[in-house]
Amino acid sequence: RFRDKRVPRMSHFPIQAPPEKIIFCIDLDEEINSNDFGKGKMKRMYTRLELITKSLRNFVYTKSNMNPNHQYAIVVGTYDAFWYEPFTSRPEELFQKLNTISDLSQGQEYERFDIGSMFQSIFESCPEILSNQTPQELGYIYRCCLIYSRSKVIPFVPSDKQELVQDMLGSPLFYFDSLYLHKKQGKDSNPQGVYNFLTTLSSSGYKVGNDYFFESSQANKRFYSHFAKLLSHPMQRTFEKSDDYVPYSY
């Protein structure tokens, strides 16, 4: 579908960047309700959903102040991913829908996650991702921000979706960031396996460093810092080398 000979991204150049259409993909596994993130000396413990909601509000308000033409949508993940909120440039509309996510998360454990369904859902709503247009011609770019919370479930891409996923990851119209919240490595958790999968996925093809990956376990300041880094426009931010990915246990 997509020709590799197209002009590669130049994210380290100070170019005029088009608005973004940002899709937040939020994992609904029971771990999203885990009360395991502390607030420094105050020892106030937050659920992951509370942190995600607060951070997304700050993110969207800040991005909208930078450029009111940015748009935001929500996809949620269970066994598969499905579209939950269409694109809007109005923060309050997004927040109203964001506040209902807690109703969807009923404490259910999902033992698999087809991440290919996330890409397929996005492509079905945004087919121009694989068009022959440049970002300047299209007038905007797409970015998916995956917020994943399962400590022992490694996502997978079914064989019938692998070509689509690779085409989308190679498109100059699409960027893929991921933020991973997890428990420490242990008998009942395998964050290293999830980490290996997501870092491999985010460094596919020639676009190594263009897509960001961050992880955090129990450290809310670290989580907020990661979200702040995601504010940068993908076409203007610095490359993140795969060698810089260092998993932490706190």
Image: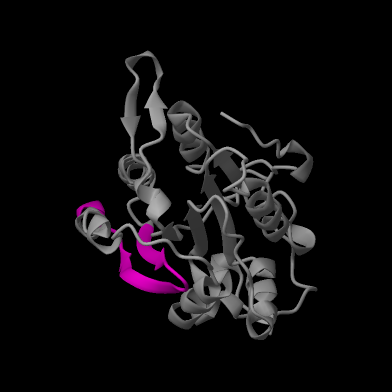
Q: Quadrant of residue 37?
A: top left
Residue 161 x/y as whole percent:
63, 81
Could you say where residue 214 lies in the image, as x and y percent from the top left?
58, 42
Residue in view at x 38 percent, y 59 percent: 28
Q: Looking at the figure, which quarter contains the C terminus?
A: top right
Spot the residue most to the top.
41
Please give the range of residues in magenta.
Answer: 71-92
Residue in front for this viewpoint, 62 or 14: 62
Magenta highlight: main SS: strand
Identity of the residue drawn at 77% across and 64% down = 205
Q: Quadrant of residue 99?
A: bottom left
Q: Which residue is drawn at the image coordinates 71% and 40% (left, top)? A: 245
Residue 124 visible in rendering? yes
Q: Residue at x 68, y 75 (%)?
A: 167
Q: Is residue 215 above or below residue 169?
A: above
Toward the viewer: 226 or 20? 226
